[in-house]
Amino acid sequence: MRVALSGWFWERPETGSGQYLRRLAATLARQETDLALTLYLPGRAAPADLPSGISAIALPAPSGPLGKVLWEQFSLPRASRLQGAELLHVPYWGSPWRAAAPVVVTVHDLIPLLLPAYRSTALVRLYTALVSATARRTALILTDSQAAGGDIVRHLRAPEARVRVAPLAADAGYHPDSSLTPLESLGLTPGYVLYLGGFDSRKNLATVFAALAQVRQNLPDVRLVVAGRLPARDSAFAPDPRRLLREAGLPENAVHFTGFIPETLKPALYCGARAFIFLSQYEGFGLPSLEALACGTPVIASDTTSLPEVVGDGGVLVPPDDAASAAAVLVRLLRDDAYHGEMRARALRQAVRFSWERTAAETAAAYRQVVGG
């Protein structure tokens, strides 16, 4: 089967869409040998790091947001038609209105549609309306979780029979035996509580800090590590966590802000943590929680949207705004070695349920479902 794969995010591996594209493409090429994959890239040259078994075609793209739309709606479907593609897969929410071959689109979540703060400009609202309409016209919609699939059926009004779940996975580099040596370069010693996962408002850092403040009433030396590049400016959409820290009444030394963390350092960061806290109010999947589980780090996560599917009984689920419950779990994980060991074992058992081999197999099955009628 000749499959055209949109590579718009290939050169942005720091994004979730970029990671998904790279890991999915590499696993499909290695595992699904009956697929002939062609990656279409916005630019003038194929990348040097292309996985074996994938061909690439560069399609020049005009600059700016309009250039992206023109590339998605015209350049990509035209080029894939000329190459005789039997199926076009757009691995992010941006499928074309019309294509010669059947289209599969991956919709990771409906955040711009469901959360008003994420469609604050007219341009974003127009683009969201466009890709909502084009997703309804596709042969099949892939998504990361049953929760996201339910949102797609309810809010995009897509027929349930044309929505298929293919869960994500942590990369093979996330495992409990990762070296802790890289922590030295970050000025860290093991035993901290970790948050990693972005700073926009739905990530709910204010509740994380409120929980930390309660924990420090019993364990005053506990330190939270907050990983990731901080917002360029303080806003309602992306509140500066340093301001939230002050508002929670915490001293500056209670939290260590690492700044940007490359992928190569993340396994060590998870493995050095006593616990990982992730109280997001909305996730289409919630990959950081799975990465923590794969490293054997006990997870405290929200009991909402996709997170119960990902965390399962491998962690502890609490209401996203319940700082007291999160604090109580943190205190127990920090004090009780036996409980911590039990939760570590549960985390590892839960993590092995997810793999990129499974994701690729589900995706290939979707392709065959579409092309086979």
Image (cartoon, rainbow, N blue to C red):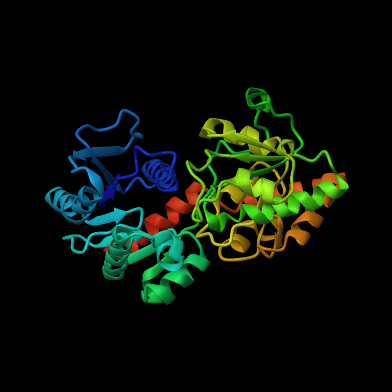
Q: Nearer the viewer, residue 274 or 113?
A: 113
Q: Residue at x 32, y 67 (%)?
A: 132
Residue 107 vs 198, above or below: the answer is: below
Q: Nearer the viewer, residue 25 or 287?
A: 287
User: Do we see residue 189 in this rendering?
Assistant: yes
Residue 60 vs 72, above or below: the answer is: above
Please identify the quarter of the rendering in which residue 172 is found: top right
Query: Residue 92: x and y, percent?
Result: 36, 54
Q: Residue at x 39, y 59 (%)?
A: 365
Q: Taking 134 as reference, is 221 left or right?
A: right
Query: Residue 234: x and y, percent?
Result: 52, 47
Q: Residue at x 32, y 64 (%)?
A: 125
Q: Taking 272 as reference, is 202 left or right?
A: left
Q: Nearer the viewer, residue 219 or 18?
A: 219
Q: Taking 108 as reference, is 34 left or right?
A: left
Q: Nearer the viewer, residue 318 or 267?
A: 318
Please identify the quarter of the rendering in which residue 361 is found: bottom left
